Amino acid sequence: MTERKQIALGVIPKETPFSWRYPGAFAEADHDFDHFRFIAQEAERGLLDLIFCADSVALRDDGMGMENVSHTGTAAYFDGMTIIAALAAVTKHIGIASTASTTYWHPYHLARQLATVDHISKGRAGWNLITSGQTSEALNFGYDAQVDGPIRYARARECLETVFGLWDSWDDDAVVRDTATGRFFDPSRVHRLNHVGEHFKIRGPLNVRRPPQGHPVICQAGGSTEGWNLAAEYADVMFSKATAIGEAQRFYRDIKSRLLQFGRHPDQLKIMLEMRAIVGRTEQEAHEKFRAVQDMVTEREAKDLLKQFLPGVDFTDCVMDEPIPDTPEINAAAQRFRVFVEKDGRRMTLRELTDTGFGSWILIGTAAQIADQLVEWFDSEAADGFMFTPHWLPGGLTDFVDQVVPELQARGVFRTAYEGSTLREIMGFDRPSNRRAAVQDYAAQ
């Protein structure tokens, strides 16, 4: 009998911008490590594949202004790479991944920090590669505006290749620890990178040994053709976003077909779709939980949040319970930023758009109802798994672990125990070979 294919599950430990006001929420969570530890350990209790710390290098005030962003609970937060290093020490099985931008990080720093986290966690690190698209980030790094997209992606490709080269600068067996000869490592098994490119010049080798996974798991969430191609060529995991199953299926088929262009098998990339699940013991209870958060959002706050997705667009004429105006300006911006303003063939209201999380797939119901929908999308090849963003924390994650995970296990689509010790093993990815292992170049330099 063929073994049932398994759903991949991850969690993003960042609730909705206004749910910090929700009764029972932990308002200090953004700067309290005990909160992150609890979330990671709850996710591990639920046997989830990974916890992913989304990150940026700016206060997220694009299009909003300081006064408006001051109402959101997700504007300021810890550095993601530091958080996953700390989480490595308080978890044993779950993967730990963070965002880091190739536009503002140097590849040597990236390679060194991620290799370090992979060693500390014994092979559980992941990297969400982004190129950054916020003006607020550019202004923190000496730019007057965003770096043009083609330049960002050219830099990203070169950065990723050099990071791979640095991870591969040590053979897996380079350290010999020969007490008889006094030789700690074999210099013939350590390789300089000697990279000279358009954006970087790096000699190498890395001063951290090759990561336990070979390469930490690479994630990507690009919303452009360049990002999709980058994911198809290099990524192990791609984060996606859709609100309708047909749309998710089209994206799934598109990305999987792109892998073939780069000589990869479709199974070498898992597409994990973002979703919010609000679970209740009854459907009514779940809807009450959902509305308890959503009804706190004012018209001004909804407009301000929308400006983050569509900077520069004037929403003065938007009213909470009237359709979003059908203007060329809004249409062009919505298409560019993949914000979904249509529902059932009509233009949504601002309240409806806020309720959907500006393009997130929202599931509200009992554990059985939510599990039914996840399995349907999974079996219909709309996704290989799901990135769960709790509607509020910490209770939203606990509800999911206690109620939805057992339903998925009962259907045979989710693990009942961790198998494997590294994130690659848990997610079913092969360990990449060292592309420089046969090169004997160190002693000659």
Image (spheres, rainbow, N blue to C red):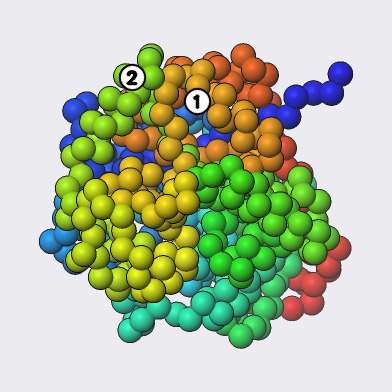
Of tags 2 and 1, which is closer to the observer? Answer: 2
Marker disc for residue 85: none
> Which quarter of the figure has residue 8?
top right
Upstream in sequence: badge 2 or badge 1: 2
Q: Amino acid at mark 1?
A: Ile
Q: Is residue 340 left or right of residue 62?
A: right
Q: Position of residue 279 (x, y in %)?
A: 40, 23
Q: Are marks 2 and 1 in contact (CB under 8 Å)?
A: no
Q: Position of residue 208 (x, y in %)?
A: 60, 57
Task: Tell me the residue at 86%/18% (across/down).
Answer: 1
Task: Tell me the residue at 69%/73% (across/down).
Answer: 193
Q: Secondary structure at mark 1?
A: helix
Find disc 1 in the rendering and name its residue.
Answer: 370
> Which quarter of the figure has residue 147?
bottom left
Does the rendering let one see residue 161?
yes
Q: Is residue 355 above or below residue 333?
A: above
Crowding near the residue tagged with mark 2, few <14, some 14–19, many ≥20 C-alpha atoms within 10 Å: some
Q: Could you say which is closer to the camera, residue 368 or residue 206?
A: 368
Q: Position of residue 88 (x, y in %)?
A: 48, 38
Marker disc for residue 284: 2
Crowding near the residue tagged with mark 1, few <14, some 14–19, many ≥20 C-alpha atoms within 10 Å: many
Q: Could you say which is closer to the camera, residue 2 or residue 167?
A: 2
Does the rendering let one see residue 421?
no
Q: Is residue 427 above or below residue 256?
A: above
Q: Amino acid at mark 2?
A: Gln
Q: Is residue 234 above or below residue 327?
A: above
Q: Secondary structure at mark 2?
A: helix
The residues bearing labels 2 and 1 have C-alpha atoms spaced at a distance of 14 Å
Q: Position of residue 83 (x, y in %)?
A: 40, 46
Indicate the quadrant containing the C terminus: top left, top right, bottom left or bottom right: bottom right
